[in-house]
Amino acid sequence: MGATLSTLSYLVASVLFILALRGLSHPETSRRGNTFGMIGMGIAILATLFHHGMDLGGIVLVIAGLAIGGTVGTVVARRIQMTALPQLVAAFHSLVGMAAVFVAAAAFYAPESFGIGTHGHIHGQSLVEMSLGLAIGAITFSGSVIAFAKLAGRMSGAPITFGGQHWLNLGLGLLLLVLIISFVATGNAALFWMIALLSFALGFLLIIPIGGADMPVVVSMLNSYSGWAAAGIGFTIGNLLLIITGALVGASGAILSYIMCKGMNRSIINVLLGGFGSESGAAAAGGGDADRPPVKAGSPEDAAFMMKNAQKIIVVPGYGMAVAQAQQVLREMGDLLKKEGVDIKYAIHPVAGRMPGHMNVLLAEANVPYDEVFELEEINPEFADADVAFVIGANDVTNPAAKTDKSSAIYGMPILDVERAKTVFFIKRGMASGYAGVENELFFRPNTMMLFGDAKKVTQEIVQALQR
């Protein structure tokens, strides 16, 4: 009876997790999706506790762990700024990876507790599952730590490369495969820890050559890794729900990585090996400063006057908006313009920001109506009819060089067609290139007017001008 109830509870939790993923696919249903996920996790925890029939000491330890983790999570969630969400997600992925390593170690040294054999005589199938979960978990941990450091500015966001790097990674990957085969054949403890150490090193080496422009792909890729690590450990300890949940996370992360790569016209292999996204990369091919047309700089008052008299405006937010925390004042500007009868829409590129959905989250925080927010494929045909494209903190995702310059590092990447608008207002601190290290041709187009300064301050000045 207990086993049947546990299995039924796991089934209910699994359905709730699927509904959670479904809900998180759209801003309007994201809160409901989070609620489904929390309820599912609560059911899963209770079912696991009752199924294993822990003694009082074990239950106290589990509750203590939940209390500590829950308290830390609550404090972090309340204090975290929306701009810091990408590095927070990377940090969470690292914890999932390390949890997989710890569970693998527990299963290896106390196999009787998991029903997979006795110490020194673990079932061969369990050794395979254990070693894979251990390796993927360790790679996820160290890779996520590097992603966190890059996103948080603790280390340079530029690619870190050296001669023979790819051959080194290939050699370490093959060595890891040999160690796993040897471990499965012998069950040797030294091999177990060699797999762990080599995987930690491989995760580090895989992420350091990836630059800032590829971070959205890295975040979703590490999300996928954490799911597969959990699924592997689920097989090891015979936990059906962990297998299902890990597979859901792993598959959804892989699909999201594909979507991100499609949004950049790159493959996963290209991301892992390409070193794309240098903060100090060379400018786009072309002439020197003398060959460039002049840049037109305007004032917030100029922008306010032209937008107030426009019929249709498309706003393009980017990471600069997130850094400046300008989403609230941006929504205020939109509300004022709508009162003047202006049609306002927001255009979201799939890799804008530093994680998938970063701009959607920020706009939702500012209570921008969901029906005003559009993805690249939906909004691109409308730029030609727009009187104004208002670019706030976006760069590479608006660069026409992606369509015209075959020598450019971003050539072939789908972009938002802001250059087709009658007038483009571009808020930027200076003329520096974006994370891809490519100079933006849009700055020099005759229909572009640069609004130099902090995104929030400039937008506030536009709001003040609109209120006069």
Image: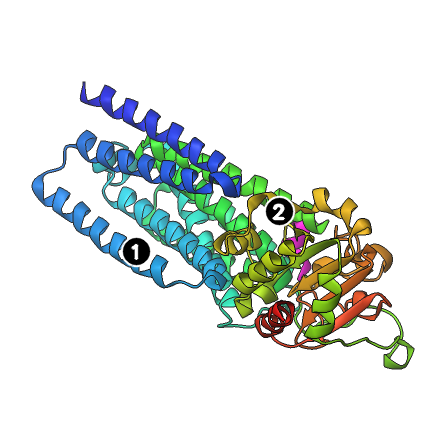
Magenta stretch encompasses residue 273: yes
Q: Which colour scheme is used?
A: rainbow
Of marks 2 and 1, the one in the foreground: 2
Q: Name the residue under label 2.
A: 372
User: How far is disc 2 from disc 1 in space, using C-alphas?
Assistant: 31 Å
How many numbered discs? 2
State the residue at coordinates (73%, 68%). 305
**Towards the viewer: 25 or 295:** 295
Quarter of the image where the N terminus is located: top left
Residue 226: which disc? Answer: none
Q: Residues within 10 Å of mark 1 (few under 14, many from 20)?
A: few
> Residue 284: image x %, image y %?
81, 68
Q: What element carries label 1?
A: helix
- Under circle 2, the secondary element is helix
Q: Report the residue at 78% width, 45% height from top.
A: 381
Identify which amino acid the numbered label 1 is placed on: Thr
Give the main secondary structure of the magenta stretch: helix
- Find the residue positioned furthest to the bottom: 290
Q: Where is residue 334 in the image (x, y as percent from the top left)?
A: 61, 58
The one nearer the camera, 39 or 342, is: 342
Which image quadrant for residue 194? Answer: bottom left
Magenta segment boundaries in residue numbering = 269-275
Q: Which of 348 and 214 is in front in this view?
A: 348
Residue matched to label 1: 74
Q: Which amino acid does label 2 sit on?
A: Glu
